Image (cartoon, rainbow, N blue to C red):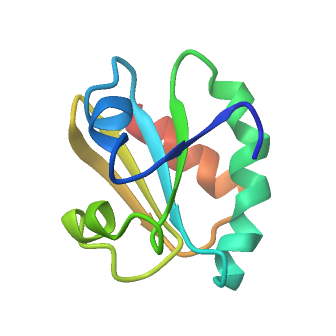
């Protein structure tokens, strides 16, 4: 995982994402998920473009089931944009780089 992506889990999600001073994009994924492996390099590639404006994080739903349940994650990949502790945007399924940038731009 690149230095531009934060790995979050059940124990650090509240502090890193919900209490973040800047909007956060959280990629809910699992190692066995094909579409998750498709979107991962796209998320990594665009993260540096938003440095200081958006925090990019990944949450393995197998390793952090409490947070996944809390947000009702039923399909992965699911991307949530969280701003001031509130979900302001949701994108379910793999998307292109342009679609992901449009989603981030619309929700920051």
**Which residue occupies 65% across, 72% down?**
36
**Which residue occupies 62% across, 26% down?**
50
Q: Relative to 97, is 50 on the left or the right?
A: left
**Which residue occupies 72% across, 39% down?**
46
x and y percentages locating residue 60 in the rendered image = 52, 64
- Depicted 52 relative to depicted 69: above or below: above
Q: Relative to 51, is 105 on the left or the right?
A: left
Along the viewing direction, whichever of 51 and 32 lies nearer the viewer: 32
Along the viewing direction, whichever of 80 and 16 lies nearer the viewer: 16
**Which residue occupies 75% across, 47% down?**
1
x and y percentages locating residue 2 in the rendered image = 77, 39
Q: Relative to 99, is 85 on the left or the right?
A: left
Q: Relative to 86, is 102 on the left or the right?
A: right
The mark tally for this picture is 0
x and y percentages locating residue 65 in the rendered image = 34, 70
- Where does the C terminus fall, quadrant-wise? top left
In the rendered image, which quarter is residue 21 located in? top left
- Depicted 62 relative to depicted 81: above or below: below
- Depicted 49 relative to depicted 59: above or below: above
In the rendered image, which quarter is residue 32 located in? bottom right
x and y percentages locating residue 54 in the rendered image = 51, 28
Along the viewing direction, whichever of 61 and 100 lies nearer the viewer: 61
């Amino acid at each position: 995982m690149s230095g531009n992506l934060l790995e979050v889990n059940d124990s650090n999600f509240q502090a890193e994402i919900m209490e973040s001073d800047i909007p956060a994009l959280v990629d809910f994924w699992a190692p066995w998920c094909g579409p998750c492996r498709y979107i991962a390099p796209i998320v990594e590639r665009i993260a540096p473009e938003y440095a200081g404006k958006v925090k990019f994080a990944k949450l393995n739903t197998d390793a952090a089931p409490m947070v996944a349940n809390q947000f009702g994650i039923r399909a992965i990949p699911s991307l949530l944009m969280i701003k001031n502790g509130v979900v302001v945007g949701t994108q379910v399924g793999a998307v292109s780089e342009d679609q992901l940038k449009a989603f981030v731009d619309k929700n920051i």
